[in-house]
Image: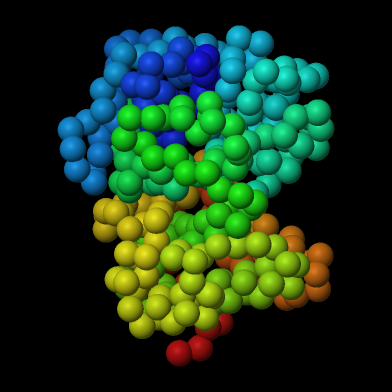
């Protein structure tokens, strides 16, 4: 198939490398300012912390513009702040033959695409792995690479066959909401320069995470939004597992089961590089839903404001776990 990957960050590099390995005709869309650095690179490389040799493939064709007429599928692998520019580049319409697969966290990207292009139905692609950029077109995967697709299209479900990247078909938005709940920890990591392992094993950080989760689950229950937690556990059971046996909670999670203890979420890298974050589409999305259904969300609102006050500023300012707990007014 002719596949366009828009964005050459960590996720875009990982997906493009596996698509090249699968034998597809891949075009990688990059920013104008990245052309000099990426033109000199000969290969895409993906290091795997979970074991096995690096995946190294020939560099696909690079482009700085989007041409969906020449694509059967287009993966959107940019952060939420850059999504509008990508949709503007699509023009007035998306060709009917081209499947559009947004890979952003949360559920907001598919909603924005539906609003902008009502004639198409985007294929939500939930990225169930953590990846980090090491060098241009060189990424490291710190969890088992898995992609969830909300589609019955056999062509799309088989895009990554025999490449080492697993694709699972899902129905509805339960998986995306479930991952959003887990990703509420990203902002806690970004405020304290912590890993997800730290969040579960440090008492102060775990208390902050559980408070954010409690609010979020209350909102989702109030709005009847579907969500599927790790191992399909009910929230009360999963919460107790997080609280009493965090190591077991990690093993139950498809997203974090194979994660390196030293892997930081991308929001930490955004803070260190003074880039905009996705906090509005994660914790902020819970606040938005809370306003719609009349449920208070003071913890997620405070976390969102604290990130927004610190993002795009250098040097990055971090709190200790106890300082964050105190800022959120969470009692012992």
For image coordinates 18% across by 38% down, the residue present is: 52
Question: Where is the C terminus found, in terms of image quarters?
Answer: bottom left
For image coordinates 46% across by 12% down, the residue present is: 25
Residue 9 in view in this figure: no
For image coordinates 74% across by 39% down, the residue present is: 112
Q: Is residue 186 above or below residue 98?
A: below
Q: Is residue 108 above or below residue 52?
A: below
Q: Is residue 65 left or right of residue 188?
A: right
User: Along the line of sight, which residue is nearer the eye, 126 or 187?
Assistant: 126
Colour mapping: rainbow
Q: Position of residue 128 (x, y in %)?
A: 44, 48
Q: Position of residue 313 (x, y in %)?
A: 52, 47
Q: Is residue 195 above or below residue 126?
A: below
For image coordinates 74% across by 73% down, the residue present is: 222
Name of the residue lying farthest toward the bottom: 332
Q: Position of residue 217 (x, y in %)?
A: 62, 72
Q: Is residue 92 above or below residue 270?
A: above
Q: Position of residue 173 (x, y in %)?
A: 63, 53
Query: Exactly how many numbered labels are in the figure?
Result: 0
Please tell me in which quadrant of the rendered image residue 139 appears.
top left
Please tell me in which quadrant of the rendered image residue 83 appears.
top right
Q: Is residue 153 left or right of residue 202?
A: right
Please tell me in which quadrant of the rendered image residue 249 appears.
bottom left
Residue 179 in view in this figure: yes
User: Along the line of sight, which residue is nearer the eye, 328 or 262?
Assistant: 262
């Amino acid at each position: 198939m002719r596949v366009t990957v828009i964005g050459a960050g960590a996720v875009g590099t990982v997906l493009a490398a596996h698509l090249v390995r699968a034998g597809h005709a891949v075009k990688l869309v990059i920013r104008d300012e990245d052309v000099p650095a990426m033109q000199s690179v000969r290969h895409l490389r993906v290091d795997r912390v979970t074991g096995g040799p690096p995946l190294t493939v020939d560099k696909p064709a690079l482009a700085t513009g989007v041409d969906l007429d020449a694509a059967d599928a287009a993966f959107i692998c940019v952060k939420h702040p850059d999504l509008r520019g990508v949709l503007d580049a699509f023009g007035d319409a998306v060709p009917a033959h081209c499947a559009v697969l947004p890979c952003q966290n949360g559920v907001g990207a598919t909603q924005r695409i539906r609003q902008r292009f009502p004639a198409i139905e985007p294929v939500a692609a939930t990225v169930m792995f953590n990846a980090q950029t090491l060098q241009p077109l060189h990424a490291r995967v710190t969890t088992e690479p898995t992609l969830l697709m909300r589609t019955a299209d056999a062509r799309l479900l088989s895009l990554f066959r025999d490449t080492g990247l697993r694709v699972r078909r899902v129905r509805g938005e339960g998986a995306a909401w479930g991952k959003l709940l887990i990703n509420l920890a990203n902002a806690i990591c970004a405020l304290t320069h912590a890993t997800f392992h730290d969040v579960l094993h440090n008492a102060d950080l775990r208390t902050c995470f559980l408070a954010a989760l409690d609010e979020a689950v209350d909102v989702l229950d109030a709005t009847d939004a579907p969500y599927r937690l790790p191992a399909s556990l009910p929230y009360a059971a999963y919460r107790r597992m997080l609280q009493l046996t965090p190591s077991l909670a990690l093993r139950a999670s498809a997203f974090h089961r194979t994660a390196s203890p030293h892997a930081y979420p991308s929001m930490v890298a955004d803070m260190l590089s003074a880039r905009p974050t996705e906090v509005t589409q994660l914790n902020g999305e819970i606040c938005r839903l809370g306003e719609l259904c009349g449920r208070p969300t003071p913890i997620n609102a405070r976390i969102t404001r604290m990130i927004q006050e610190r993002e795009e500023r250098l040097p990055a300012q971090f709190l200790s776990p106890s300082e964050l707990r105190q800022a959120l007014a969470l009692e012992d």
